[in-house]
Amino acid sequence: DGGITQSPKYLFRKEGQNVTLSCEQNLNHDAMYWYRQDPGQGLRLIYYSQIVNDFQKGDIAEGYSVSREKKESFPLTVTSAQKNPTAFYLCASSIEPGTGVYGGANVLTFGAGSRLTVL
Amino acid sequence: GENVEQHPSTLSVQEGDSAVIKCTYSDSASNYFPWYKQELGKGPQLIIDIRSNVGEKKDQRIAVTLNKTAKHFSLHITETQPEDSAVYFCAVRRGTSYGKLTFGQGTILTVHP
């Protein structure tokens, strides 16, 4: 079955530590995204990548870093510079606009999420 | 940047009733409006979407209406069932911003049997 796999599902971190969240997709999608979900605030875009070896900052990129060395993988590192990292993190992917069934609608396929708690 | 307001934040209905969730947006250049459903412990999943050249779209018990002049769009669920209980998010995409969706704050829908 095609889909997006996020790991770990739950992660605990001590203050001052960097942690990396994994995101792998086998949908052959070009674009991948990281969103952060907090209660009452919806989903906010952290980083996105439209193609391998390229990525762009989203609305709340400070304290985060990403890499896109392979089409299938888009790991997110939460650094010690992120002041309030406790949240639910969602990875997503989509077919580039103009090539998908919806002709540019950018249907996002989400993973099941990773919950990060800072102790 | 784009601002999306979603209301209500919580909605409780009896099974069989209708549910309506509304979103307003600020950027008149927005042209794509999806709705996502998030069940407990899962990632959001697209349930319906509409583009700016269409005023209404239906898919069985769910429908979305768009008022471009007023810059708001709504999700309508008829004959609600307990399995409709979830968090619903509206989203907006501006022009050719590719996958850069701006999401609303979410609505927790509870359908009581």
Image (cartoon, coloured by chain):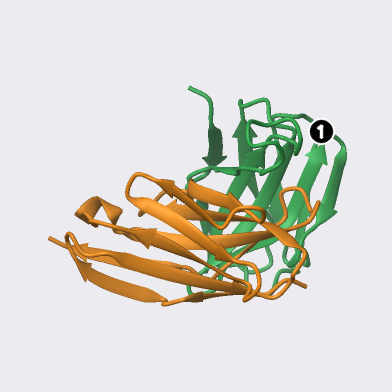
Query: Which residue is located at x 61 percent, y 44 percent?
Result: A92
Which residue is situated farthest in the right direction here? A54
Query: Which residue is located at x 70 percent, y 75 percent?
Result: B26
Q: Amino acid at mark 1?
A: Glu
Query: Which residue is located at x 61 percent, y 27 percent?
Result: A27
Quarter of the view holding residue A68:
top right
Q: Nearer the viewer, residue B21 or B88?
A: B21
Chain letter for green?
A: A
Q: Is residue A110 visible?
A: yes
Which residue is situated farthest in the top direction here? A1
Q: Is residue A13 visible?
A: no
Q: How crowded is the residue under tag 1: few (<14 C-alpha within 10 Å), some, or many (20+)? A: few
Horizontal and vertical percent position of residue A95: 69, 34
Quarter of the view holding residue A31:
top right
Q: Nearer the viewer, residue B5 or A20?
A: B5
Chain letter for orange?
A: B
SS for dot 1 = loop
Query: Which residue is located at x 66 percent, y 38 percent?
Result: A94
Horizontal and vertical percent position of residue B89: 49, 62
Horizontal and vertical percent position of residue B25: 64, 73
User: Viewed as shown, does residue B21 lie left or right of A15?
Assistant: left
Number of marks present in the image shown: 1
User: Viewed as shown, does residue B5 lie left or right of B45?
Assistant: right
Which residue is label 1 attached to?
Answer: A69
User: Viewed as shown, does residue B18 lie left or right of A4?
Assistant: left
Horizontal and vertical percent position of residue B99: 71, 49
Residue A17, above or below B6: above
Q: Which chain is indicated by disc 1? A: A
Residue A56, above or below B90: above
User: Viewed as shown, does residue B13 lie left or right of B31?
Assistant: left
